[in-house]
Amino acid sequence: MISIILNIIITVAQVVGGLISGSLSLLSDALHNFSDVLSLIISYIANKLSAREASVSKTFGYKRAEIIAAFINASSLIVIAIILIKEAVERYFNPQSIDSTMVIWLAILAIAGNGFSVLLMKADSKTNMNMRSAYLHLVTDMLASVAVLIGGLLMKYYQLFWIDSVLTAGIAIYLIVVGYDLLKSSFNVLMLFTPSDIVIKDIVEAVCEIEEIKNIHHIHIWQLNEKEVHLEAHVEFHKNISISEFDSILTKIEKVANDEFNINHINIQPEFNKEDPKDIIVQD
Ligand SMILES: [Zn+2]
């Protein structure tokens, strides 16, 4: 919470400072900080939403709110970065004078603010993975502000105004790298792609080791959100087993899927001599 508030203060100061001083690199650092604040707020709201209960009209509740938030965050990050690169290229060939004193002071403010957040999180970052990623993110934020500070000094003492465009492009490229990763992983979840750490061939082999099972086919493995992985499939049996026998085999399948593949929701259609396509992946 403290680091969110600090980030908001820094961002507002940098946006105003960037506009007044005419420094694009300060503005891009601000937009980066702004996107951080936005993603923290969106994650917070999404988190609250996803805790809402499911209902007859929303059987999954809002469990995908965080994935949609991540997708929107990543897309806007990339759009912002592309606009910044376009501006930076135009500025490079047409440099403008910049109030470098203001750039220097605002960069120092950003370094101090982010530095304080880094200190706050340092202890937690050693035990909690989520805090560790937030911590590392803040460290890179601080390095971006250090670059802006160095740029401000070069502009003030050597009038190297082109440095502003170069720094802007550097920050924008960093935004694209971060945004692309997030865009790709949220896109994969939204498209119901098989989670990248699950190999379908392995799960087929593991399930077929249960002796009553003839084959498993028509498989779908997809993620509802970061926590929940679903498996849907048809399972064909050698014999016309009873439903209670199926139940005990289902428990075995659930155990394999859960222990070896981290799949936590399973929906199986049992079959005996049913005429349907027996491909592992059924087209259409
Ligand atoms: Zn089938």
Image: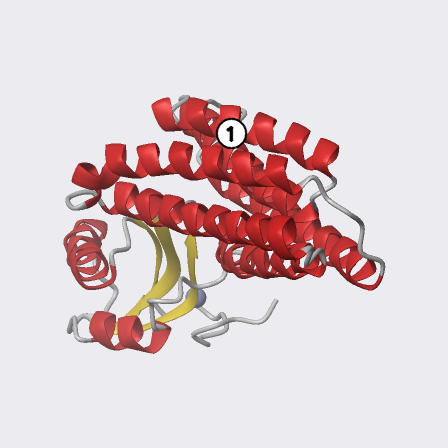
Q: Residue at x 33, y 67 (%)?
A: 197
Quadrant containing the N terminus is top left
Say what amino acid the circle numbered 1 marks.
Ile
Tell me the residue at 27%/41% (across/down): 131
Is 232 on the left or on the right of 16, as rendered?
left
Which element type, helix, strand or loop, lies under badge 1?
helix
Between 70 and 201, the one nearer to me in the picture: 70
Ligand 1 occupies quarter:
bottom left
Specify whether residue 68 is in view: yes
Q: Nearer the viewer, residue 127 or 163?
A: 163
Q: Is mark 1 within 8 Å of ligand 1?
A: no
Percent coordinates x, y for residue 160 in the rendering: 68, 59
Q: Answer whether residue 61 is visible to the viewer in this image.
A: no
Q: Is residue 211 above or below residue 33?
A: below
The single residue placed furthest to the front in the displayed view is 157
Residue 258 locus on image (x, y percent) = 21, 55
**Where residue 261 appears, x then y in whole percent?**
25, 62
Query: What quarter of the picture does the C terminus occupy?
Result: bottom right
- The residue drawn where x is 32% and y is 32% is 116
Relative vertical location of residue 44 with respect to residue 36 in this rendering, above or below: above
The residue closer to the viewer here, 129 or 153, is 153
Mark 1, residues whose alpha carbon is within 10 Å: few (<14), some, or many (≥20)? many
Q: Quadrant of residue 180?
A: bottom right
Q: Is residue 215 left or right of residue 211?
A: right
Examine the image and state in which quarter residue 28 appears.
top right
* Total labels drawn: 1
Q: Which residue is mark 1?
A: 10
Residue 38 falls left or right of residue 99:
left
Residue at 59% x, 61% y is 170
